[in-house]
Every structure is written in structure tokens, then in C-alpha cells.
Image: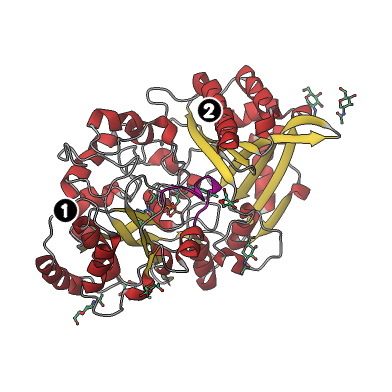
Amino acid sequence: MKSLSSYFTFVTIIALLFSFTPSSADSHEKFVQCLYNYPHNTTSISNVVYTQSNTSYSSVLDVSIQNLRFFNASSKPLVIVTPLVVSHIQATIICSQRHGLQIRTRSGGHDYEGLSYVAEVPFVILDLINLREIEVDVENNTAWVQAGATIGELYYRISQKSNTLGFPAGVCPPVGTGGHFSGGGYGFLMRKYGLASDNVIDAHIVDVNANLLDKETMGDDLFWAIRGGGGASFGVIVAWKIKLVSVPSTVTVFRVPRTLEENATEIIRKWQLVADKLDEGLTIRINMGRVSQNGNLTVQAQFESLYLGGVDELIRLMQKSFPELGLVREDCTEMSWIESVLYMAGFTSGQSTDVLLNRTQLNGVQFYKAKSDYVRDPISDVGLEGLWPLLYEDEAEDAFVQFTPYGGRMDEISGSETPFPYRSGNIFHIQYGVNWQEEGDEASKRYINWIRRVYKYMEPHVSKSPRAAYLNYRDLDIGVNNNGYTSFSQARIWGIKYFDDNFNRLTRVKTKVDPQNFFRNEQSIPSLLSKGRK
Ligand SMILES: Cc1cc2nc3c(=O)[nH]c(=O)nc-3n(C[C@H](O)[C@H](O)[C@H](O)COP(=O)(O)OP(=O)(O)OC[C@H]3O[C@@H](n4cnc5c(N)ncnc54)[C@H](O)[C@@H]3O)c2cc1C
Ligand SMILES: *[C@@H]1O[C@H](CO)[C@@H](O)[C@H](O)[C@H]1NC(C)=O
Ligand SMILES: *[C@@H]1O[C@H](CO)[C@@H](O)[C@H](O)[C@H]1NC(C)=O
Ligand SMILES: *[C@@H]1O[C@H](CO)[C@@H](O)[C@H](O)[C@H]1NC(C)=O
Ligand SMILES: *[C@@H]1O[C@H](CO)[C@@H](O)[C@H](O)[C@H]1NC(C)=O
Ligand SMILES: *[C@@H]1O[C@H](CO)[C@@H](O)[C@H](O)[C@H]1NC(C)=O
Ligand SMILES: *[C@@H]1O[C@H](CO)[C@@H](O)[C@H](O)[C@H]1NC(C)=O
Ligand SMILES: *[C@@H]1O[C@H](CO)[C@@H](O)[C@H](O)[C@H]1NC(C)=O
């Protein structure tokens, strides 16, 4: 990961040897031959190339599918490459262009709409599952993390070296750093330290010309774009250098449920007034869903919290700022930060931190659909009370609505510092999600309709012009590109929802680094120069 300069001469020679003209889709045999012919000076590529006739093709494809909706997708990749070294990535980029194939890059496979492994065109998956080295430098409080590593692996490696260092990324351990850091990435340290992408200090990316670039050689614009603008539009990210953050050796957690009968609505009303103004070491998120109490349905709001300090200080803060929750000492547990990572991920207490290395979801893979919103003015009681009946409907049996507070560090970073624009002025972020078990289109349609109705219902209560959304909670309902040429104005429909005004700069960066729009998908940033390119 360190000797970048040696790659440049190597790549220049390759570029000369491999000048190409893009063609329409060839047979994938020619593509595979091209991969084999590409000079890989250290590690042969043939052990990491899977076509549909390889016996392990399906298991390699399926292992990182994190949404059952796309498990049996009719359009599967012609080839999967699981690179071991950078030259395998470079070869895949060069040969895909030569033979008219698209690339979908996959790190953890958590894309909500399956964009990292499903496409309606002939395509190759570049799956970074083998590139997951992590080097933690406790002297300088930094780490190099390869993009195929998961956040669970990262947290685990940090904890092996220090119990007072952490990293502000997501809650679910199998999430990949490739997608997660390039789209933002948040969890219980966001109010103190911002997003994962706010703590990226260098990166290695392979661009459309197969050049391996670092922060210096990629330049300010591209380095800006990949910290929140999504990696998939710009190249293949190989590794991130991140700044680790300090955490106290003792933190405190709690998870306190309140049903409607226990005044949940009133408590949520008060939460909206204080959640973004609390001490930035205190994060209280709310998970709402329906529960059954002796046969009667009600809504339960679960208040889930991490406090960066001991229980005495937490109780004092809560009595001062949020007594309505009625938190008592017995609700709270002191632990180390890494134990809190397990707690928030849903593991039972006392489990070994090794479980963070497991790339399988704790509750198994499900069918799901999710959407997101931002809230700038508190939602009225009437607004909340209109949401509850939706949670009693049949499709909402395994549905949730989650409120995550902003404020703290998020207020200090300007909206244009990275592509992620939603900082000060937002009280909280909402995720709506629905999971189901039944197979088939008919079931999918019913559950997806349910969540679309929830989203429609919430419209008057959330941000407008644009109605903001979070890229990492990918939602193709908010707009998509054509399968071919997409105008700036068409892409802007979804683009401003994720990026607000930053969409304009993202488009300029894309036009500069990938003018022919090779790296594209249903929601990739358009190039202003690729008119007519199929
Ligand atoms: C169960 C679950 C829990 C989650 N929890 C959180 C959370 O707590 N906080 C949060 O912020 N988000 C969360 N997310 C959302 C998550 O951040 C995004 O889905 C993220 O994009 C996943 O990254 P990935 O590498 O696993 O996904 P992938 O599906 O591999 O990739 C996602 C996108 O990034 C692109 N991409 C991936 N790797 C690279 C690369 N190396 N170079 C260029 N482009 C690349 C893909 O092509 C695709 O477009 C969660 C998602 C799930 C399913
Ligand atoms: C390829 O070989 C060159 C020269 O021997 C070396 O400098 C370079 O690091 C090698 N590339 C890889 C990917 O190992
Ligand atoms: C896939 O099959 C081909 C042809 O049998 C073989 O050469 C290649 O090594 C196989 N790939 C893997 C990863 O086993
Ligand atoms: C995928 O298809 C197979 C074969 O038809 C079927 O057995 C399996 O249940 C399907 N899985 C999903 C998740 O739809
Ligand atoms: C810390 O950074 C310095 C300066 O960049 C470097 O010389 C040193 O090797 C780093 N420490 C470790 C343990 O890598
Ligand atoms: C709910 O609020 C009412 C009115 O403020 C109060 O009397 C009652 O005790 C509360 N119930 C619970 C369970 O806290
Ligand atoms: C459930 O509803 C019935 C009828 O409204 C009511 O009599 C009963 O007390 C309720 N049970 C609980 C636990 O609230
Ligand atoms: C990984 O987690 C899954 C889901 O919880 C579990 O079934 C599996 O046994 C775990 N694997 C290992 C190696 O622990």
C-alpha cells in the first residue's frame, strides 16, 4: 500500500501496450483472455477470475448479497474478479473498456438497491473481498484500511492495539468500507466526530486510465468527491487512510423502551427539542416499531444511547436535559468502547469481539427496502400520531422508523466541505425500513408500496426543496439515470436530493476524471461530455 511511485512507470508502460478503442459487448472469453494477457508481475490473475462455468461462481456471487430482493436477479455478471493486487484491478478496468463491459465494484455488498452486483447490461463484478488488510498506527493515530475490509474488521483491529482509540463509522459490522466511507458513513460517534468520510485523510484509487492515484496525485477535486459523493462514479477505491479518534476507556450505554401507553409520543416531542443540543458525547437515537402487548398492538419507541463517559455523569446530564425519559442507573451499563460496538450491533453481552470479523448479518439476510429523510423543524404530535396507524398495517410487522440526532460536530463542518451537504440546521435524520420473508414479486410489491405510503405521508413533516436523502441509504424511487445517455437535468432530479448544491461540483469532477462516463450505474454522477455514449 505504500510504494505508490513504483506503480507509475509500470502503469505508463501498460497504457502504451494496451491502447484500446471501446467496442460493443464481445464474448466474455475475449475479456478473460485480455485479463490473462495483462502483465501481472507478482500474482497471477487466473485464480481470481470466475465465469459462470466455474463451480464456485455462485458462492462467490452470493456471499456478499445483503438484500434477498436481488438474490435471484435475472441479470448476473458475466465474470467476477476478486483482485489480490492492484494490477488485477487495473487489468479489469482496461479489459472491460476494450470489450464493452461495465464494471460494478463491490466491497461489502450492502447497497440497498443492489447496485454493486446487479446491472441490466453485460457487466463484470470487481469484488474487493480479498483486499481487506488493515494497518493501525497507534503512534500517529491513523490507519490504512483496504476498501474490501468491513467496519467490524476495522473496529476489531483498532481494539487490538488500543482501548482509547475508535472510529466514527456505522453500526452494522459487515458493512464494507469501500461503499460506506465513500458515501458518508455514520454511527454513534457522529455527534462528536462527524462522518467516517470526514475522517478520511488519504486514499488510493484506480482511475479510468488504470492509474493508481493517492491524495496528492488525484488532486483536491477528486479527493473531495470520493469523501461522500460515492466511489462508484469515479473509479475503484483500493484503500483509505483514516484519522482515528479518542474514546474514553469507559463509556455508558442504555436501551430504554417506551410504548404509547407509557407516553412515547410526549417523550419523542421533548427529544426533538433537545437531541441535537445535548453534550456531543451523548447520542440518543430512537427506533420505533410496533409490538404486541397481551394481544394488543402498540407502538414502542426504543431510546438507544451511547455516552462517552461514566454513568454518574450521564445520569446528571439526563436529569438536567431530558428528565422526561425517566432514565435510571439500572437502565445503564458501563463498558469499553469496543464492547459498546457489540452492544449497538445487537450482540448479547459477554460475546467475544471476534464476532466483529464475521461478514454475515447477525439476523441473516432478508428482503428489505428503506428510505430516508431529514428533519429541520420538530414534527408535531399530530404528525407523529398519524404515523402510528401505518405501523399497525400487516406489512409493518417487521418495519421500523429510526430517528438519529445531528448537532455537535455536524454543526461545525460546512455543507460544502465534502459532498455530504446536510449539516447544521438538521435536527435529525430518519430512516424508514421494512423487512419481509416471503419470496416473489407480489410480496415485494406489497411491502414496497407500504414504505412508499409512509414516505408520502411524511412529506409535510420533513425537509423540502430538495427533500433530502442519504446516499448510503440508496433509493432508486427518488430518480434514476437512463440506461445510456443521461442529461444533467435528469440526473439532477435525484442528485440534488443526495447532494444539494454539491451536485454541481460533483458533475464537474466527474467530467474531468471520467469524461466518457465509463464508471456508471443507475445513480452515477453524469459527465457533461458523454452525450450519446451508450
Ligand atoms: C444492514 C445494514 C446496516 C447499515 N448500517 C449503516 C450505518 O449504521 N450507518 C451508515 O451510514 N450506513 C449504514 N448502512 C448503509 C451503508 O453505509 C451503505 O449501504 C454502504 O454503501 C455499504 O457499503 P458496502 O461496501 O458494504 O456496499 P457495496 O454494495 O459493496 O457498495 C455500495 C456502493 O459503493 C460502490 N463501491 C463499493 N466499493 C467501492 C470501491 N472500493 N470503490 C468504488 N466504489 C465502490 C458500489 O459500486 C456501490 O455503488 C447499512 C446498510 C445495511 C445493509
Ligand atoms: C512490478 O514490478 C516492478 C519492478 O520489478 C515493481 O517495482 C512493482 O512494485 C511491481 N508491481 C507490483 C504490483 O507488485
Ligand atoms: C475457472 O475455470 C477456469 C477454466 O476451467 C480455470 O482456468 C480458472 O482457474 C477457474 N477459476 C478459479 C478461480 O478457480
Ligand atoms: C431463488 O431461486 C431458487 C430457485 O428457483 C429458489 O429455490 C430460491 O428460494 C430463490 N431465492 C430467493 C431469495 O428468492
Ligand atoms: C508516524 O508518522 C511518522 C511521520 O510520518 C513516521 O515517520 C512514523 O513511522 C509513523 N509511525 C509509525 C508507527 O508508523
Ligand atoms: C403519562 O403522562 C401522564 C400525564 O402527564 C402522567 O399522568 C402519567 O403518569 C404518564 N405515564 C407514564 C407511564 O409515565
Ligand atoms: C387490550 O385491549 C382490551 C380491549 O380494548 C383491553 O380490555 C385490555 O386491557 C388491553 N390489554 C392491555 C394489556 O392493554
Ligand atoms: C457468523 O454469523 C452467522 C449469523 O449470526 C452465524 O450463523 C455463523 O455461525 C457465524 N460464523 C462464525 C464463523 O462465527
Sequence order check, earlier mark of 1 and 2: 1
Q: From the viewer's perspective, is 442 left or right of 109?
A: right
Residue 349 figure quarter? bottom right
Split into 4 quadrants, where in the image is the N terminus?
Answer: bottom left
Choose between 350 and 471: the one closer to the eye.
Answer: 471
Q: Is residue 402 visible?
A: no
Point 32% across, 50% down: residue: 232
Give, as a single range, the part of the protein colored magenta: 64-75
Q: Which mark is residue 452?
A: 2
> In the displayed structure, would residue 526 be above or below residue 128?
above
Q: Which mark is residue 22?
A: 1
Q: CA distance from mark 1 to mark 2?
A: 40 Å
Ligand 6 image-quadrant field: top right
Point 19% across, 62% down: residue: 211
Point 59% across, 29% down: residue: 450
Q: Residues within 10 Å of mark 2 (few under 14, many from 20)?
A: some
Choose between 78 and 106: the one closer to the eye.
Answer: 78
Residue type at the position of mark 2: Arg
Residue type at the position of mark 1: Pro
Split into 4 quadrants, where in the image is the C terminus?
Answer: top left
Q: Secondary structure at mark 1?
A: loop
x and y percent of residue 192 in the render? 49, 48
Main SS, magenta region, reads loop
Q: From the viewer's perspective, is 475 left or right of 264?
A: left
x and y percent of residue 120 in the render? 36, 44
x and y percent of residue 425 in the render? 43, 30
Q: Residues within 10 Å of mark 1 (few under 14, many from 20)?
A: some
x and y percent of residue 276 in the render? 53, 35
Mark whose residue sits in front, 1 or 2 = 1
